[in-house]
Image (cartoon, helix red, strand yellow):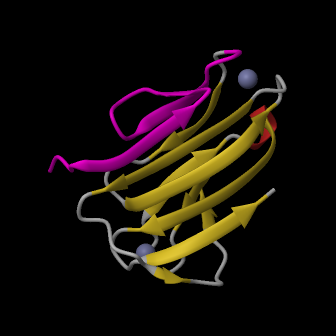
């Protein structure tokens, strides 16, 4: 299922595919994580790479829903942040590659919006 992108704003960041796959810092070319293609509805990520570069990603789709804020923590399964309600794998942030980050991600299947700050 191909989704129609509404917003796509990448700053100092490269994505391996149109709206998913490995994420790279454009300054040092290190991969900083992996975004699952089909399970998120909206992603907002700001980070500081270990090289000092500030990067960000904003992605959503024509059919993205607003979502409901959820205070639950994302669960980590095999290095990947997953939705605690349905275990959908959403995103991997390689902790050792980034000094800090702030993320807001919506699970497509249950419409929960999760926040994560490091
Ligand atoms: Zn970097
Ligand atoms: Zn979910």
Quarter of the picture for ligand 1?
Answer: top right
User: The C terminus is located in which quarter?
Assistant: bottom right
Q: Residue furthest top?
A: 28
- Residue 79 drawn in magenta: no
Q: Vertically, is 27 above or below 114?
A: above
The residue that appears at 46% across and 67% down in the rendered structure is: 106
The magenta segment is 1-28
Please provide percent x and percent y for residue 16: 42, 26
Q: Residue furthest left?
A: 1
- Residue 13 drawn in magenta: yes
User: Is residue 78 visible in this depiction of the protein?
Assistant: no
User: Is residue 77 visible in this depiction of the protein?
Assistant: yes
Please provide percent x and percent y for residue 113: 52, 74
Left/right of residue 102 with respect to residue 18 in the rendered view? right
Q: Between residues 38 and 9, which one lies in front from this camera angle?
A: 9
Left/right of residue 60 with respect to residue 57 in the rendered view? left
Q: Vertically, is 71 above or below 94?
A: below
Please provide percent x and percent y for residue 77: 58, 60
Please provide percent x and percent y for residue 75: 62, 69
The residue that appears at 49% across and 55% down in the rendered structure is: 43
The residue that appears at 36% across and 40% down in the rendered structure is: 19
Left/right of residue 12 with respect to residue 40 in the rendered view? right
How many discs appear? 0
The residue that appears at 46% across and 71% down in the rendered structure is: 87
């Amino acid at each position: 299922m191909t989704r129609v992108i509404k917003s796509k704003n990448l700053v100092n960041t490269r994505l391996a595919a149109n709206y998913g796959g490995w994420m790279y810092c454009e300054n040092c070319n290190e991969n900083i994580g992996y975004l699952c293609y089909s399970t998120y509805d909206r992603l907002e990520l700001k980070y500081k790479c270990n090289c000092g570069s500030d990067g960000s990603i904003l992605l959503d789709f024509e059919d993205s829903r607003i979502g409901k804020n959820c205070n639950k923590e994302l669960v980590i399964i095999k290095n990947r942040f997953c939705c605690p309600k349905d275990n959908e794998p959403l995103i991997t942030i390689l902790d050792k590659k980034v000094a800090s980050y702030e993320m807001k991600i919506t699970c497509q299947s249950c419409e929960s919006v999760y926040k994560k700050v490091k």
